[in-house]
Amino acid sequence: MLPTKLAVPLLILLFYSSFISSQAALPLQTPIQKDHSTSQYVITAYLQTPLKLTKLLLDLGATYTWVNCDGYTSSTYRHVPCNSSIANLLGAYSCLDLCDGPPSPSCGNNSFLLFPDNPIKPVDYKKVKGLNTALIDSFALSTTQGSLTLINNFIFSCARTGYLKGLAKGVAGLAALGHSNVSIPVQFNRFFSCSPNCFALCLSGSKSKPGVAIFGSKGPYDFLPGIDLSKSLLYTPLISNPFGKDSDPDKPRSSPEYYIGLNSIKVNGKMVALNRSLLAIDGETGPGGTTISTVVPYTKLQRSIYKTFILAFLKEAASPAFNLTATKPVKPFGVCYPASAVKNTQMGPAVPIIDLVLDRQDVVWKIFGSNSMVRITKKSVDLWCLGFVDAGVHPMVSSWIGGPSIVIGGHQLEDNMLQFDLQSKRLGFSSSLLSKGTNCAHFKFSTKNM
């Protein structure tokens, strides 16, 4: 029997009975496809009634999911009333007392309003007309058995078409996986209280095969050829930053981003001399520290860290072990080498290994050439470039909130298994799966998966 919470009209249930799970089946899974024209990662979900396949930008640092509601049609949507318990859960934003148009997903009396964020191209709220109401509607993801598991009270925000600028073709909104009360993993955990409050990501850089997001499971994570990656993870604490981008000067709000405690960086086994104060979160206004991002394509380093790191990498790459001489770089990168001079290995280009030393000296996230280097081929140029970029002197997340000193970007995450254990407040990570003879495109999806 379907859970009693799945109050979906009978006709719709009959229509979708061939692929809606008959149980609250867990874990849930969805493919993660990389859009190579934008370097964005996209998941597939199902929204509305009848259910409609919807592509969403995967954002590991977003508070709530949002979807373009221009043309949104559903027989089951509801607005979130002002001063309701759900509105309190979402936090203090705004309220629409009377709608001045016909009732629709984006217009309703006594409706709670949100202000969606586009992390790729910031929205000019003055130019994008229309209100963004908070909605409750049907939302479904695939299970590992290939069926769909549905919740009918998923909380998200409407957004107008103007919010889609800069997003990959066909993407209709944003999937929030951030540290918040209404992220996708937290809402599924709340709906199916028996599931672990945990999710995992494995991003693939393949042009033909996707990676995977898994919700409600600490393992096994089965990859070809018969490897359970949950058994080989290292763990480090997840850290909260009390100052998120939605903070007001007189009322801080926690950041939805996932921070980890990076203590030092090594290149080719040698310590990089960094300003260690930048590696910690400033308890007064929130800058500093290290976050993980799926919307930043390449790791961003605060300028002084970047300069020191680049010099260390150049020195080690020029050593007899590698014998590499840098050439003119291609933006946005600062270090590039002729591709013909760089040897290829199982772990990618033969360059110095970068070690991110976390909360203990024996907890090390290793970045091999496959994740540190980016191939640039255009016109007469064929280069391997170091995929780390300058974030500026004072990275910011809002007009007055300082940003992290280091943002680990998507390219560095590819073919790495990441487990976000929200209950135990820890991150599990694998380093490159290439060392284990597999990659993120080798997840064993059910043959029934849609």
Image: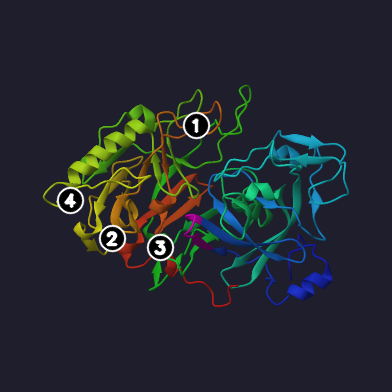
N-terminal-most mark, 1 or 2: 2
- Residue occupying image coordinates x 60% and y 56%: 56
- Whole-percent x and y of residue 390? 37, 38
User: Can you identify the residue that label 2 sits on?
Assistant: 348
Q: Is residue 450 left or right of residue 257?
A: right
Residue appearing at x 73%, y 64% in the figure: 3
The disc labelled 3 sits on which kind of residue? Leu
Q: Measure the alpha-carbon separation of dots 4 and 1.
A: 35 Å
The reply to whether the magenta stretch includes residue 65 is no
Q: What range of the chain is rendered magenta?
A: 32-40
Q: Amino acid at mark 2?
A: Gly
Residues at marks 4 and 3, CA–CA distance in whole angstroms: 34 Å
Under circle 3, the secondary element is helix
Q: Which residue is mark 1?
A: 396
Q: Which mark is residue 229?
A: 3
Foreground label between 4 and 2: 4
Query: Which label number is shown at residue 118?
Result: none
Any mark on residue 324, and which? 4
Q: Hey, what amino acid is under mark 1?
A: Met
Which residue is painted at 38% across and 74% down in the image? 225
Percent from the top left, x then y, of residue 368? 29, 54
Q: Secondary structure at mark 1?
A: loop
Q: Residues within 10 Å of mark 4 (few under 14, many from 20)?
A: many
Q: Earlier in the sequence, mark 3 or mark 2?
A: 3
